[in-house]
Amino acid sequence: MAVSEQGLTFSPEIEARLEKAARLCSEQGTTLTPLRREVLGLVLSSDQPIGAYALLDHLRRTRAGAAPPTVYRALDFLRERGFVHKVERLNAFVGCPSAADHVGHDHGHAVQFLICTRCGRVTETEDEAIIAAVAQAAERHGFRQMRATVEIEGLCRACAG
Ligand SMILES: [Zn+2]
Ligand SMILES: [Zn+2]
């Protein structure tokens, strides 16, 4: 990422994803404002989950007045739209690789995160069998499930090998 007069700019691949996100937002009657765009770009550029304060540090390179609520509001928007997920265990955020397929799912889709405790990488999966099993377990307890994110810690293939 680089700093220009327009704000933060990202690699061509990330810029392409941001363009797509901006299009999806306008199709839904919302706007990917420059701030939201920068926050999403920072999350997508990070190869590990990134926390709100790390995001804030980057944002302050172009927005001296940025404060925690600035970042949290942008993150809330991006989560509601399904562009990013929060990994609760790490209190940090990751970009959703299938964001375009889940547009408008306000509470996000049911995912599992494979969290590598050695290198910190997080891989998102969406396993139908796990989703069904969690839903059945909740139902047996008369529990009305709203979100079903499963976080699994261990070693990624590179670290385990
Ligand atoms: Zn996702
Ligand atoms: Zn690893």
Image (tube, grey):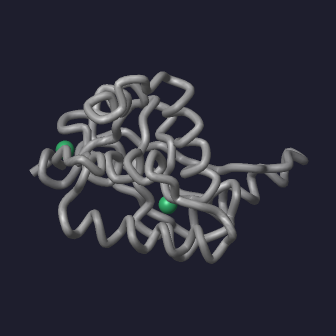
User: Which residue is located at x 23 percent, y 69 percent?
Assistant: 13
How far across and how far down the image is residue 130, in percent?
57, 61
How far across and how far down the image is residue 90, in percent?
41, 30
User: Which residue is located at x 48 percent, y 43 percent?
Assistant: 151
Q: Is residue 152 left or right of residue 120?
A: right
How far across and how far down the image is residue 113, in percent?
43, 50
In this view, the residue farthest toward the front is: 5
Q: Nearer the viewer, residue 76 or 149?
A: 76
In this view, the residue farthest toward the left is: 161
User: Which residue is located at x 12 percent, y 52 percent?
Assistant: 158
As drawn, 106 above or below 26: above
Q: Nearer the viewer, residue 88 or 114?
A: 88
Q: Is residue 103 left or right of residue 96?
A: right
How far across and how far down the image is residue 53, in percent?
38, 24
Q: How many marks?
A: 0
Q: Is residue 61 left or right of residue 127?
A: left
Judged from the image, the quadrant occupied by ligand 2 is top left
Q: Nearer the viewer, residue 5 or 49?
A: 5
User: Which residue is located at x 61 percent, y 59 percent?
Assistant: 81
Q: Is residue 117 left or right of residue 30?
A: left
As drawn, 127 above or below 52: below
